[in-house]
Image (cartoon, grey):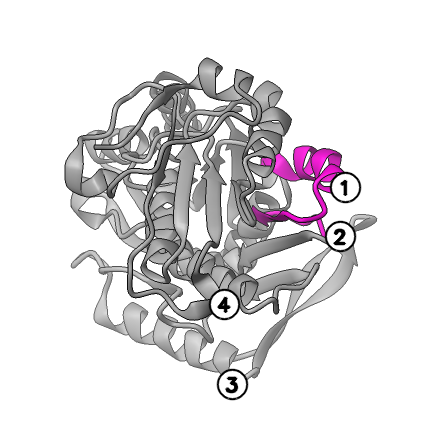
Amino acid sequence: MATRFNRRQFLATGSATVAVSVLLKACASPSSNNTATTTSPNTAGSPASQGFKAAIVLPGVITDKAWNQAGYAGLNEVKKQGAEIAYVEKIGQAEQAEALSDFARRGFNLVYAHGGQFDAAIQQVAGQFPNTFFVGVNGAATGPNIASLRIDHLQASYLCGIIAATMSKSKKIAYLAGQEFQATQEELRGLQLGAKSVDPTIQVSSTFTGDWNDAAKAKEAAAALISSGSDVIYQWLDNAAPTVLQTASDQGIYAFGNTADQFEVAPKAVLTSAVKRIDLAIAKLADLAQKNELKGQIYSFGLEEPTILHLGKFNPAVPADLQAKVKKTEDAILAKKITFETCTEGGKATRCVKGAA
């Protein structure tokens, strides 16, 4: 069975040994407690993977059916490569640096920090542990032993923006996320660009709850957006996502799933989902690390990697001609007939769309 640690115990133990166990998923149901867990490697790993240890620090729980669960799934993909793996859940901002440091002290070769909100903590600790490579998922930090892994959120949200603007009756749509940092800013920008390509006058508002998992805050924010007239909500939340999708369904408006295909969560409301197979992207970088080919740079995956980034199941309410328009636009992005280039707008650096389908 898996050896499990209370979060406070994990953060306080420093270089204490973590017991190796069989795969958690096969042996025990996840606890809601904050824990650190290791699992033994598969025996079929490549020679390069022997003795390789990878860990992930998660801001939420591995059962959220969204961001954190996708990160945990990625860690298990790394296990299939023959690595020993470990994770810790529900790490808040004040605990980030110590959680990352503790895995490094335990001799882990690769440590993922699962969210752009970890960038400052990564930069704080990486120089102290040159033998550990830190990867910020959705981050922007780089360094000798720091890489960032990104999905091109703007590409997917651009396509969703086209759908949102076409399906909206009020001509008011909204973006709702947990925190504001580069990845969410880019996703919001894509939604704006896609929507305005359909209707330049459409209003796109945004709200950040400050918490990816607080369902009460998310429900309150969604209700406020609906009260202000938004009839389509593009959300990016973790454990709080189902609450927003269900609120949209109850109020008779539309919404978008995110990270996982969340159509079944609220089939009356979800138009489609921006499916981000971050688990496969995590595994790709682990493979590079085991080959000593991982570099201190930003690795970005977009629609050109359809197994990693794609749209999910369409709601029957989305007309066939609109689905065809979205597919034509996606093809134009892949053919580079539509590009998203760095520009300045309102005195700030952003990305602008060039070209047409």
Q: Earlier in the sequence, mark 2 or mark 4?
A: 2
Q: Earlier in the sequence, mark 4 or mark 3?
A: 4
Is label 1 in contact with label 2 (beta carbons under 8 Å)?
A: yes
> Which circle marks residue 127 in the picture?
1
Q: Is residue 138 left or right of residue 19?
A: right
Q: Amino acid at mark 2?
A: Gly
Residue lying at 49% horizontally and 31% vertically, measured from the top left: 178
- Compared to residue 254, the image places residue 79 above or below, namely below
Question: Circle 3 is placed at which residue position?
Answer: 335
Question: Circle 2 is placed at which residue position?
Answer: 143
Question: Circle 4 is placed at which residue position?
Answer: 302
Q: Amino acid at mark 3?
A: Ala
Residue lying at 61% horizontally and 74% vertically, measured from the top left: 339
Residue 296 image offset from top left, x and y in percent: 70, 59
Q: Secondary structure at mark 4?
A: loop
Of 17 and 202, which appears nearest the observer? 17
Residue lying at 43% horizontally and 74% vertically, measured from the top left: 330
Residue 316 image offset from top left, x and y in percent: 16, 59
Please tell me whether mark 2 or mark 4 is closer to you in this view. 2
Q: Tell me the distance, in whole angstroms, between the alpha carbons under discs 4 and 3.
A: 13 Å
Residue interval drawn in magenta: 117-143
Please tell me whether mark 4 or mark 1 is closer to you in this view. 1
Residue 57 image offset from top left, x and y in percent: 49, 35
Q: Earlier in the sequence, mark 1 or mark 2?
A: 1
